Amino acid sequence: MKTIIIEDEKPSARRLQRMLSVLNIEAETMLHSVEEAIEWFNNNPHPDLIFLDIQLSDGLSFEIFEAIEIKSAVIFTTAYDEYALRAFKLNSIDYLLKPIDDYDLENAVKKYQERLPQKQAVTLDFNDIKKLLVNPIDREYKKRFSVKVGQHLKLVNIDEIECFYSENKGTYLHTTEGRNYLLDTTLELLENELEPQTFFRINRKFFVNINAIKDMVSYTNSRLQIKLNSYNEEDVIVARERVKDFKTWLE
């Protein structure tokens, strides 16, 4: 069974590759962007099974299917919430919610293998799913976060937060008052909980609040440096592949 992994985070791709090897599935090919995947599909026989991350470094992975007609079976690996996942269920799409669990992975592979004798075609309505993910209807976003202060819990309203960032395997929020609080979550999960007109993920480590941006300066390698009102613990840099989307978001 020819299997490939399309995942922009290389450590996650390698972890999934190791998990599959335990199930005697060798995923020798790993692709990390929409552009790389399109080029690969244009020059190689299509695999039997694709493990596909939704959000890649240069766009949504649905763009691959808009450019190439692919007949392979697909198992999505995603950090999107249950609201979005309803679309996958309606379209008979297998999915794995990150972080991927061994048991869930094994069950997803079994579903695929059980479908093989019938040679059922994989029919996916990517346009409907893409619309749901990009322009979700009636989506409820987080309005506040609870943080631990000693033995107490404190509520921080979303409009009090300048940015979210990861550091030493922890996820933190930084307030307009210059305070940092540790959160029991990840930036990947936050991506589905933050109102996209207000917060933007500028790189792997940072979400910034548009209302907290004080200045923007050209930086090396076609990047941008962001100056926030109170956060100044380290450089806040818009990744080169995110600059175009960031400028669109600003407008």
Image (cartoon, helix red, strand yellow):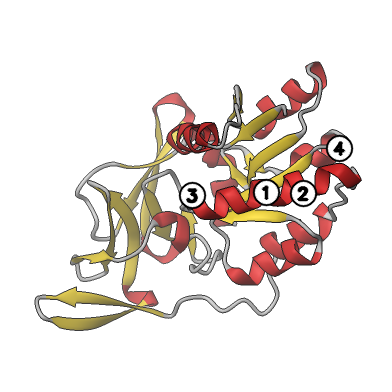
Residue on which the image places disc 2:
114
SS type, badge 1: helix
Identity of the residue drawn at 22% across and 82% down: 154
Name the residue nearer the viewer: 171 or 215: 171
Identity of the residue drawn at 73% across and 21% down: 40
Residue on which the image places disc 4:
71
Tell me the number on the disc at residue 110: 1
Question: CB atoms at circles 1 and 2 under 8 Å apart?
Answer: yes
In the displayed structure, does residue 199 sit left or right of residue 174?
right
SS type, badge 3: helix
Q: Earlier in the sequence, mark 4 or mark 1?
A: 4
Name the residue nearer the viewer: 166 or 48: 48
Q: Whole-Å distance between the Cαs marked 1 and 2?
A: 6 Å
Q: Nearer the viewer, mark 3 or mark 2?
A: 2
Mark 1 surroundings within 10 Å by alpha-carbon count, few (fewer than 14), some (14 through 19), many (20 or more):
few
Name the residue nearer the viewer: 228 or 200: 200
Q: Earlier in the sequence, mark 3 or mark 1?
A: 3
Q: Nearer the viewer, mark 2 or mark 4?
A: 2
Identity of the residue drawn at 57% across and 61% down: 80
Q: Nearer the viewer, mark 3 or mark 1?
A: 1
Can residue 10 be seen by looking at this rendering? yes
Q: Earlier in the sequence, mark 4 or mark 3?
A: 4
Residue on which the image places disc 3:
102
SS type, badge 2: helix
